[in-house]
Amino acid sequence: MKIAFPDPVETARVIAPSVAPLGSTIEVGWDGPGEDDDYIGIGKVGATGADA
């Protein structure tokens, strides 16, 4: 038995530079649906939990 799922559709994206110099200020944007609990956060690469 096989189940076919529809291809995922992109519903949102973060707009930001792919790289930036250390200590620089960057502009970050959001394009897509906005819900009350949506947010943009930053953290160290590979960090999890409170280390992020």
Image (tube, grey):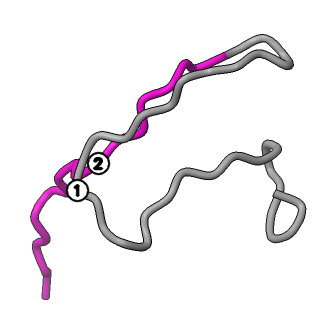
Res 2 quadrant in image: bottom left
Which kind of residue does numbered mark 1 sit on? Pro
In the structure shown, which secondary structural element does the residue marked by tag 2 occupy?
loop
Residue 8 placement (x, y as % from top left): 20, 57
Q: Residue at x 17, y 52 (%)?
A: 9
Q: Which residues are magenta?
A: 1-19
Q: Residue at x 85, y 19 (%)?
A: 23
Location of residue 22 with respect to 8 vertically, above or below: above
Of circles 1 and 2, which is in front? Answer: 1
Q: Residue at x 63, y 52 (%)?
A: 41
Whether residue 18 appears in magenta in the rendering, the answer is yes
Q: Residue at x 58, y 20 (%)?
A: 18
Horizontal side of residue 36 vs 49, given as left or right = left
Crowding at label 2, few (<14), some or many (≥20) Cα neighbours within 10 Å?
few
Q: Report the front residue among 5 and 8.
A: 8
> Which residue corresponds to mark 1?
33
Sequence-wise, the earlier of marks 1 and 2 is: 2
> Which residue corresponds to mark 2?
12
Crowding at label 1, few (<14), some or many (≥20) Cα neighbours within 10 Å?
few
Q: Quadrant of the N terminus?
A: bottom left
Which kind of residue does numbered mark 2 sit on? Ala
Residue 37 placement (x, y as % from top left): 43, 72
Residue furthest bottom in the image: 1
